[in-house]
Image: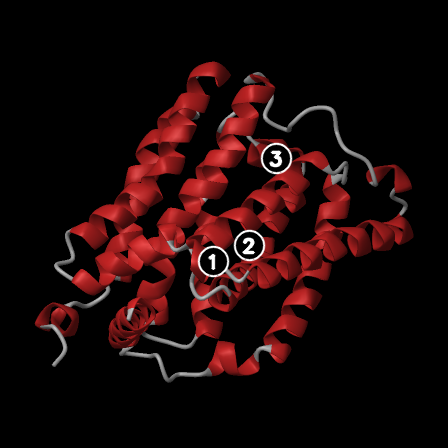
Amino acid sequence: MKSNKVENYKYRPVLFFAVTFLCTWIFWIPAIFMSENMAVVFMLLGLIAPAVVSTVFILCSGSDTLKKDLRNKLIGFYKVKWGNVALAILVFAIIIVCTILLSLVFGQSLDQFSFTEDFTFTGVGIASALVAIIVASILEEVGWKGYCEDSIGNYMNWFWESVIFGVIWGFWHFPLLFIQGTYQAGLMVNPLFAINFFVSAIPMGFIITWVYLVSDRSILACMIFHLFINFMQEKIAMTPETKCVETIVVVIATVIIVIAKKDMFFETRHVGRLLEDLSEQQEASVVKMKDCLN
């Protein structure tokens, strides 16, 4: 018989997003009016918010299954399918190469195949910029993969989950447009660049979901992929115009991935029973471990 805690718990995605936005923007909005050195502190506090909210939601859920699942996703290194992680990194590297080559048609330069000397975070120093990138890669994934994506996916297929997550994830960054020294603020030189950032978040939501699912819902796998994306977006010398071209290439890659993994994105077997599936997986893991010990 399954635990009542598992049966009675219901994911609360709307409440999660409301609390996450509040706990993030309460730091980011004041940062708009601060000096760059002070703003970076508030920016980092906002970046931490999704991970904190996600962890609190799980610890206060009353569901042992959710708690065990978070632990497995965080420290279950055995869950990571390293071949799939390497494939995802290769796919994004190919996206960058194809983007730069395609940008030549629009008058961009081959010099983009080089690394920039600095990060786009101005005024905070290379060390602070690197810390921000690492924190974003690690703690964002704890928040988004710890509770968020599952809370949406429990009610619909992963295709629509990716759409909703991409839209909300992109909008979550909105205040950063007005915080001096951030990557997003640098896009404000042209409204088209800023719009492109939010549009690109939707296909990227699909790719991140793909990495998450093919790695057996491993947060570590998503951290590694997210870190690679952030670093490459910062250090590869692509122009803002080329990053608009990149969105087109990412959309094409997303279509290919969705078609190749059609069953993954459109199956509904997990809908309404994601916690039951997790409980069954955990029971199977215990049995397997006991068999190994015997």
Along the polypeptide, which appears first: circle 3 or circle 1?
1
Q: Does residue 175 sit above or below 249 in this rendering? A: above
Distance from disc 3 to disc 1, alpha carbons, whole Å, reads 19 Å
In the picture, measured across the screen, residue 252 lies left or right of residue 258, that is right
Q: Could you tell me if the residues under marks 3 and 1 are in contact, i.e. CB atoms within 8 Å?
A: no
- Across and down, in percent, residue 97 comes to 80, 52
Quadrant in the picture for the C terminus:
bottom left
In the picture, measured across the screen, residue 264 lies left or right of residue 294, that is right
Q: Residue at x 76, y 40 (%)?
A: 238
To which quarter of the image does residue 249 belong? Answer: bottom right
Q: Residues within 10 Å of mark 1 (few under 14, many from 20)?
A: some
Q: Nearer the viewer, residue 252 or 95?
A: 95
Q: Residue at x 16, y 57 (%)?
A: 61
- Across and down, in percent, residue 195 comes to 60, 48
Q: Nearer the viewer, residue 2 or 110?
A: 2
Which residue has dot 1 on it? Answer: 167
- Across and down, in percent, residue 121 comes to 59, 26
Residue 280 visible somewhere in the drawing: yes
Colour scheme shown: secondary structure
Q: Amino acid at mark 2?
A: Ala
Q: Could you tell me if the residues under marks 1 and 2 are in contact, i.e. CB atoms within 8 Å?
A: yes
Along the polypeptide, which appears first: circle 2 or circle 3?
3
Distance from disc 2 to disc 3, alpha carbons, whole Å, reads 17 Å
Q: Amino acid at mark 1?
A: Val
